[in-house]
Image (tube, helix red, strand yellow):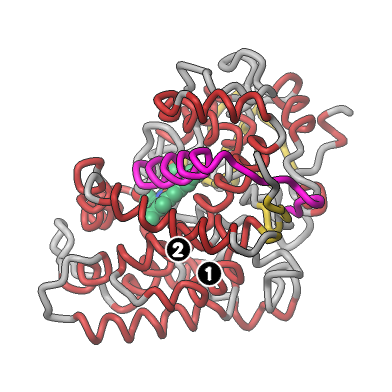
Amino acid sequence: MTPDDIDLSSLDLFAGGAPWEHFRVLRAQAPLHWNPEPAPNHGFWSLTRHEDVVKVGRDDATFSSQKGAVSLEELDDEQLELRRSMLETDGARHWALRRLLQSDFTARSLASYESFLRGLTATTLDAAFAQGEFDFVRSVSADYPIRVLTRLMDVPDDMASQLIHWSDRLVGNTDPDLADVLADSTDSDQYKDLPFRSPAALEVFAYGDRLAAERRGGDGTDIVSRLVNKVPEDGIPLDERDFHLNFLLLVAAGNETTRHTLSHTMRALIERPDTRAMLRDNPEMLPVAVEEFLRWASPVYHFRRTATRDVEMHGKTIREGDKVLMWYAAGNRDEAVFDRPDEFDVTRNPNDHVTFGKGGPHFCLGNQLARLEVRILIEEILRRCLPLQLTGESEQVRTNCIHGTKRCPVKVVSGG
Ligand code: HEM
């Protein structure tokens, strides 16, 4: 395979799982790779080396999020405004929006979550294991993070399955099993002003409106109340659209990524009895191991930036206006940073992964929460001696943005 054979815009390339070999070829032979795309798009640059992913993520003056961070769509100015959350905002306004929620996500505020998460884990695992045979994604890894989100938003637990369904339709917008309207079909043109080009966004907005109406002017400390009642530090209150888009961002971000980390980790541990036994017998190893779970899973394949000026890199010129993709998953397998990068080594330390971005202004707000959720769930599964076995192939989401598992059939066996 040569770089010219590689097309990272082809979603089918990702349907069978991550294209690790393609990433390796690009890192070695074309660290800045021009990838043509079908019209109406104009193509994108791919960065696959760790140091480049870090550099671009930190330099928001040269590599802006304002023209899109998640989608490869090339939006006009009106669409950009209609779809802009904090993720697609640069500079002072971004900072002000981020600060609205930041205090909810610090290690200190999350410390009180530990016992809640342990209780939740027990309920989730007991219900799943009682089924005997089940889909690990549906019964455990999708259910658990969404229940954390319902608590953060202070909404009833019975909203969990609806929130999962919304986020599946949004983030799975290019997978025929998950999307109601495929984003890469002309049917989605009528939804072109919505995030993910998905009608599910309208339902999420309507639900957000109901919550906002209940909480406006109140003294709630949940994240919805904060979005509704707090004025950002730049003094510009959130209008209805800001509220909708940032509410939707939390619904999607807070659940898909953690879910996929758990599914990939679980599969890796089921396939490696020795590793599992080591972690079960030495739970103090888990904080280090969690970093390897995150590197291994790399649930976000890439996010996007747009060049604000011409830039030279690796002997080529990125032109102003070009799309630049930071392939986090490829950076996480960079042999220049990670010894034996394709090995799942839970003792790897240091582990300088870029799963949450690294040091840039958009560095994942939920990183501490995700780490806590993953550690506690895996610890509790191991404590139960992990009596699980795979009963079939797991299936991957058809998208080049999220490294996601949509089904992972397992059964409970005795003795684990
Ligand atoms: C394993 C789980 C997770 C992964 C891999 C992940 C990954 C990421 C990445 C790669 C970014 C963008 C970084 C950048 O552009 O520099 C991001 C941003 C963000 N994440 Fe996460 N995330 C996870 C969990 C969460 C959770 C649990 C929440 C909240 C409940 C969350 C909320 C956010 C938000 C709000 C942003 C935007 C921050 C900004 O624009 O300033 N994430 N995440």
Q: Nearer the viewer, residue 341 or 278?
A: 278
User: How many C-alpha atoms fall within 10 Å of the one at disc 2: few (<14), some, or many (≥20)?
Assistant: many
Residue depicted at 57% across the width and 73% down the height: 165
Mark 2: is the Cβ under 8 angstroms from ligand 1?
no
Query: In this picture, which residue range is highlighted in magenta?
Result: 367-396
Callout 2, which amino acid? Ile
Q: In this orientation, does residue 349 appear?
A: yes
Whichever of callouts 1 and 2 sits on the residue coming sooner in the sequence is: 2
In the rendered image, the quadrant that contains the C terminus is: top right
Q: In this orientation, does residue 89 appear?
A: no
**Magenta highlight on residue 407:** no
Residue depicted at 27% across the width and 70% down the height: 224
Vertical arrangement, residue 60 with respect to residue 112, above or below: above
Residue designated by label 1: 164
Question: Do the residues bearing badges 1 and 2 touch, measured as CB atoms within 8 Å?
Answer: yes
Residue designated by label 2: 146
Q: CA distance from mark 1 to mark 2?
A: 7 Å
Locate residue 24, reporting x and y percent. Answer: 74, 25
Q: Nearer the viewer, residue 83 or 386?
A: 386
